[in-house]
Amino acid sequence: MEQLSVGMGEWFFTQGLIGYKTILENYGVKVKTTYDGIIVEKQHLEIMADAFFDYYLKVYSVASREERYLRRLHHQFKNGETTVKKDLNQRINETKKKVEKYFSDTEEGLQFIEAANRYRQEKKYDEKLDPLLDQLIESLSTKQIDEKLTANFFKTTILRSYFGQVSFLNVSKNALTLEEQKAVFYKDFIEPVLVEWALMDAIEKEDAEEVHKVLNGTNHKIFNSIKSAFKKKTVKEMKDFIQQKVHHCTFTEFPIALHSFEEGIFTPLALSLKNVNVTWEAQKTFLPLCSLARLLIFCSQAGATRSQNKSVFIYYGGTFDALYQTNQFYADMKNPNKTFDEIVFNLVREQKLKADYLTKNHYMIFEFTSDYDSKKTILDYMVMTPFLMKLFSEHGDLFQQIHPINRGTFIKYLLQNIDPKHFILNVLRNKIKKGYSALEVIRMIQIRHLNLLLAKGEEKVESAQQKRYVWALVKSAEEVRRKIGDKKAQGIAYRLLNAVRSHNKNTFMDTVMRTYISCDLQMPGILLEALHEEKMDFATVGNAWVAGLVSKPNEIKEGEKTDE
């Protein structure tokens, strides 16, 4: 068998196919694709160990990462920000300990240690620190040092959360050289695939001698049951045994599946089968896998985007090539700290360029993190519907005026189809408490209002008019604040927020009407929406009016101006 076509399936398996292609193409090898998957070639399997390590050594290079970090802090220190020296010293010291552990007897290692000690001793910036920093980076960039530290990093930080301590990821393998670790990977992940392929080839050719040669040539324990069963069987009996007694692969339909979907295969989703009676509970827990499926899933981390220590994967109906390109579009490894909202808007921009963001595609976004030691996985499943794509695409400017921390959380509420009204209310309450600007809250109120209208399926939403409705409430409340003063406005704002949270329309309207009367001001008719909810729902009206009551006049004028 020289090649096998593998189709997409469960999202994490599809992520594995994308990871497999990403790893090999990073190595300069073209992976053939089909409409719904890839073609795995034997010649590619034979170089996979080198390609796998090459990918992770490039993407997660410790030398490259430390250079970016140290030069940025050094630049700040050089420009008078003395407070960053503590972070600089700590970062350099952490790296120095790693270099001392493995390279204290090498010239490059000693150079790094000496430069690190001298740099850390200086409390104030001096020009002599510039060449010291260059020496640190140059020594760290030495191939031997960079590869060793990078391998330790991607094994313990990147892959461990996905696969535990299987194969070369086991801490006992840390002392091995890079080539020795590649050999372990090849033996554990590649060789079983080649054995299974050779075995099926021999059976299909009805070559009993070759079957025994293949089985006797491997010492992998997973083949022991087949070795024992085949000892006195004819080729026909071997075929019958494979057909009747051996599981077929869940994900590839390959006729030999000797692995099960356990924690060592994919930690975020799998469960240990050690204490499960597989015979009784197979329908609930047992998913058989062939060695190729196991390898492909082991490539899954490379198929996702790493964002703030979490994995993000986009999945939707379409061709494999389209799905691959979508995930590759924003998998910018030069910026591993890309935020979740940046990923979402990158996706929207890409789809807008393709002019298909108004189609019926539903983009499923999986964001997850897993802790192998505590056996804990946090998985968020989000859906970007066509109307959300439209919202993000046409009103991205509104999102940009929300603080990054709040923006990420706010977007996740929208993607999870959770009404963010309580989140908006909590942010607004915090603004009132600390006396901060409420402009970003007004933007969230506008976005939520537009989202509600789009979600209803209304064919035409006059967004400019809808945003003006919100500003009308804000400006009216701001006029009230000028009459009653900031302190009194704050007290009223707290009472009204409680009414909005409890959905108490009568209390809200009674308080607002009394306030207008006391100020001798005319209450705008749009406030009656709090009762009737024809143009806007109560939460939109209530939060908008309270935001206006505590907002800053100049920001209201500027914010309204940008919406014209």
Image (tube, rainbow, N blue to C red):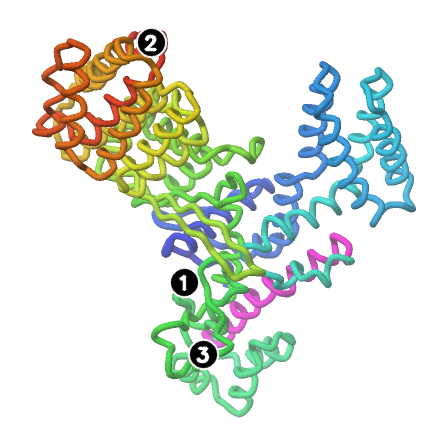
Please, what is the three-letter code of the amino acid marked with disc 3? Val
Q: How crowded is the residue under tag 3: few (<14 C-alpha within 10 Å), some, or many (20+)?
A: few
Task: Check residue 553 in the rendering and tell me which mark sits there, or answer none.
Answer: 2
Taking depth in this image into account, of 152 and 471 the one nearest to the observer is: 471
- Measured Cα–Cα span from mark 3 to mark 2: 65 Å
Which residue in the protein does label 1 denote? 252
Which residue in the protein does label 3 denote? 276
Q: Note whether 555 is above or below 108 in the view shown.
A: above
Q: Quadrant of residue 119?
A: top right
Q: Is residue 178 left or right of residue 491?
A: right
Q: Secondary structure at mark 3?
A: loop
Q: Earlier in the sequence, mark 3 or mark 2?
A: 3
Please, what is the three-letter code of the amino acid marked with disc 2? Pro
Residue 140 visible here: yes
Q: Is residue 60 left or right of residue 467?
A: right
Q: Earlier in the sequence, mark 3 or mark 1?
A: 1
Q: Secondary structure at mark 2?
A: helix
Q: Quadrant of residue 564?
A: top left
Q: How crowded is the residue under tag 2: few (<14 C-alpha within 10 Å), some, or many (20+)?
A: some
Please, what is the three-letter code of the amino acid marked with disc 1? Thr
Give the extent of the magenta segment: 176-204
Q: Earlier in the sequence, mark 2 or mark 1?
A: 1
Task: Check residue 456 in the rendering and tell me which mark sits there, or answer none.
Answer: none
Nearer to us: label 2 or label 1 = 2
Task: Answer whether residue 183 is magenta in the image.
Answer: yes
Taking depth in this image into account, of 146 and 257 the one nearest to the observer is: 146
| Residue at position x 25%, y 27% in the image | 543
Residue 239 visible here: no
- Measured Cα–Cα span from mark 3 to mark 1: 25 Å
Q: Horizontal and vertical percent for residue 532?
A: 7, 29
Q: Note whether 480 is above or below 246 in the view shown.
A: above
